[in-house]
Amino acid sequence: MAGRSPSPSQAGATPNRLKRKAPASSAVPSSSTSLGADQAADEEDIEELEREVADLGRRILEHRRDAAARFIDATVSRLVALRPPACLVEVPVEAQPAVGTSHAEAEQNITEKLKLFKSKTEANISAMPKVLERMNECVARMEKVEQLNLNIHPVFQRRR
């Protein structure tokens, strides 16, 4: 025994609960006390596993809630970054309404959101002539390039 490495239970490692085998001595129970001890140990293991499952369930729910909030924040920031400079309007970060908000507060929140939507829509409409002008300029440039009789390298030509 001097040259052998210690077994996992002797080394202090926790045994794998999924692959636990009954010891050879418990195959034939010699007394009722060993059965009681085995049942108590099994019940403790079951209770510990149930606690772990409950903890995992709680952590998964928290992660789902956090992931949804992170997704919304990332989407809003991405859309704000993609806006043209003329349309930049400060978007106020609203705190989440409390669970027990009154009807009047809910209506006030809705009217604020409608005003914000209206201001964004007006900003988009006011920027529309500039966008159309840019589009027309780009189309004119593309037509001008198409009318030129230039030799285009075959690498840059489309296959039809």
Image (spheres, rainbow, N blue to C red):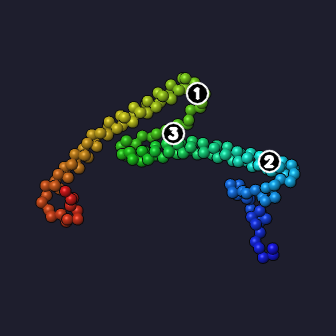
Residue at image mark 1: 101
- Is 93 displayed left or right of 32 in the figure? left
Query: Split into 4 quadrants, where in the image is the N terminus?
Result: bottom right
Give percent across and percent down for residue 153.
19, 65
Pointer 1: residues within 10 angstroms few (<14), some, or many (20+)? few
Q: Quadrant of residue 96?
A: top right
Check disc 1 and give the amino acid type. Answer: Thr
Near-viewer residue (15 or 31) = 31
Which of the two discs, 2 and 3, labels the residue nearer the N terminus? 2
Question: Is 137 rendered above or below residue 100?
Answer: below
Pointer 3: residues within 10 angstroms few (<14), some, or many (20+)? few
Task: Describe the element under mark 3 as helix, strand or loop.
Answer: loop
Residue at image mark 2: 39
The label on residue 93 is 3
Near-viewer residue (55 or 43) = 43
Q: Is residue 44 visible?
A: no
Q: Residue at x 60, y 30 (%)?
A: 99
Check disc 2 and give the amino acid type. Answer: Gln
Question: Is 24 rendered above or below residue 62?
Answer: below
Give percent across and percent down for residue 78.
44, 47
Near-viewer residue (124 or 26) = 26
Task: Describe the element under mark 1 as helix, strand or loop.
Answer: loop
